[in-house]
Amino acid sequence: MTSYSPGLHGRALTRRYDDASPAVDQVTVSVAPSERVALVGASGSGKSTLLRMLLAVEAPDTGEVTLDGAVIRPGPARSTRWFRRAVQYVPQDPGSSLDPRRTVLDSVAAPLRWLRYDGDHRARALEALDSVEVAESMSDARTGELSGGQKQRVAIARALACRPRYLIADEPVSGLDLPLRDLVLDVLDTVCTRDGTASLLVTHDLAVAARTSDRLLVMADGRIVESGSTSAVLGSPRHTHTRALVDAVPRLPVVSHL
């Protein structure tokens, strides 16, 4: 155990593959309870590697990840179950994480069994599906029959059914058309606001970051090159990488959730 520090923290994280330059190099990142953070960076900036460490999928070469002061390391289900209950993940490609043979309801209820939640799993799964506007009439459909937008909402419902305190979403609206993108972002906004769920949303799209976060981290070449309130970073970017990202987005809206 380290000293108590509420929130999800990665401190001085470094991860190197083979003899290449570090994919993540001395990165420190934190998400406080109920906070909404966006992590922005181009492909290859190190975002995915950082997420794998924060999710205890990979161990850092140096540094540590903590949740409320407890050090988190990859390990068997028994030792990480409490962490999986607190921190849930929405993948970029929900199709790769949903068994196409399973029904929608069974897919959403499955983590409740794996993580050994008490109570009525069916009712809890249906409640989560309702929160993302998936009708109960679809609960018996197989996930392989769903559209991309429907799969994404089912993936979000599966995470929300666990009632996590922290939600990590990797490009949750990448590849969706504008109406579906707006729907998914509205769902995330509503649920996080209603339940006080903290979120870390990873995106390459500054417009999405502006809409969904109070604090913004900009990543490039394995490092966090700029951070601050979303309005400040987007309104007056300091780093050349951030300025280039902002300049590439015409008339970027800046939305504060404070």
Image: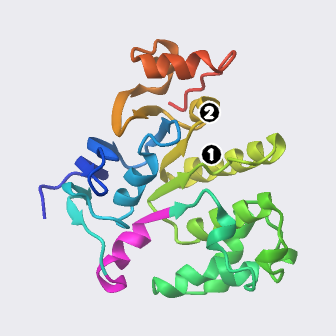
Report whether 79 appears left or right of 257: left
Report whether 255 appears left or right of 180: left
Q: Nearer the viewer, residue 104 or 224?
A: 224
Q: Which residue sits at x=61%, y=53%? A: 191
Residue 72 appears at what percent x and percent y?
26, 66
Residue 213 appears at what percent x and percent y?
52, 36
Question: To which residue does mark 2 refer?
Answer: 211
Element class at badge 2: helix
Span of residues in magenta: 76-88
Element class at badge 1: helix
Residue 50 appears at what percent x and percent y?
38, 51
Report whether 92 appears left or right of 222: right
The image's mark for residue 165 is: none
Observer-side mark, 1 or 2, equals 2
Report the magenta stretch's main SS.
helix
Residue 4 appears at what percent x and percent y?
17, 55
Q: Nearer the viewer, residue 181 or 97?
A: 97
Q: Which residue sits at x=71%, y=50%? A: 184
The image's mark for residue 189 is: 1
Could you tell me the amino acid type at mark 1? Asp
Q: Is residue 113 shown above or below 151?
A: below
